[in-house]
Image (tube, rainbow, N blue to C red):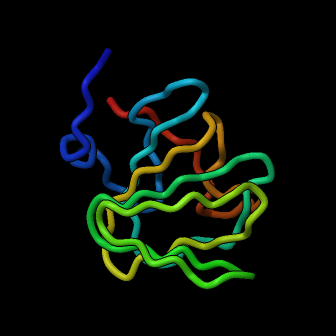
Amino acid sequence: MEKVSPDEAFASIDEQWSPHIAAELNGQAVKLATVEGEFVWHHHDDADELFMVLDGALTIELRDEPDVELEPGEFVVVPSGVEHRPVADEATRIMLFEPAGTTNTGNVTSDRTVEAERLE
């Protein structure tokens, strides 16, 4: 077992929208990312995705439903197949829970598509 300090982990994350794997459990990845600006519209065919705001604010824009505004300590689960776009007006620290191996841009390939790196 390894204890994880999100504050210490974020100190090693320099790039925006690049999730880093902090832990894995039961086939799920716990990822940390710093985000700012607009991400790409996308969905995940076979994966629900949990977004939790640790610091800052995040809006999950949805095509067919009202946007979801998240403040620190709040989270939302975006069900598989639901098209969404995360947006942060300021630098925001988030935690993601999703099946291990889930691509950050889901069904879309773009310059924002990255493989999640494991935190050191």
Quadrant including the C terminus: top left
**Residue 28 location in percent, x, y?**
57, 33
In the image, is residue 85 above or below residue 23?
A: below
The structure residue drawn at horizontal position 45% and vertical position 37%, both measured from the top left corner, is 21
Q: Residue furthest top?
A: 1
The residue nearer to you, when weighing 55 against 39, is: 55
Which is nearer the eye, 91 or 23?
23
User: Looking at the image, how many numbered discs can be counted on the residues?
Assistant: 0
Q: Residue at x 51, y 25 (%)?
A: 25
Side (left or right) of 11 relative to 110: left
Q: Quadrant of the N terminus?
A: top left
**Residue 39 picture quarter:** bottom right
Q: Position of residue 19 (x, y in %)?
A: 47, 49
The image shows residue 19, relative to residue 119, as above or below, that is below
Location of residue 77 by image quarter: bottom right
Give percent across and percent down for residue 52.
Answer: 41, 57
Instruction: Give the x, y percent position of residue 102.
Output: 65, 43
Give the residue displayed 53% in from the left and 53% down from the top: 50
The answer to which quarter of the image holds residue 23 is top left
Query: In the image, what residue occupies the spot 57% across and 24% down?
Result: 26
Left or right: residue 97 compared with residue 70: right
Out of 64 and 37, give the one closest to the viewer. Answer: 64
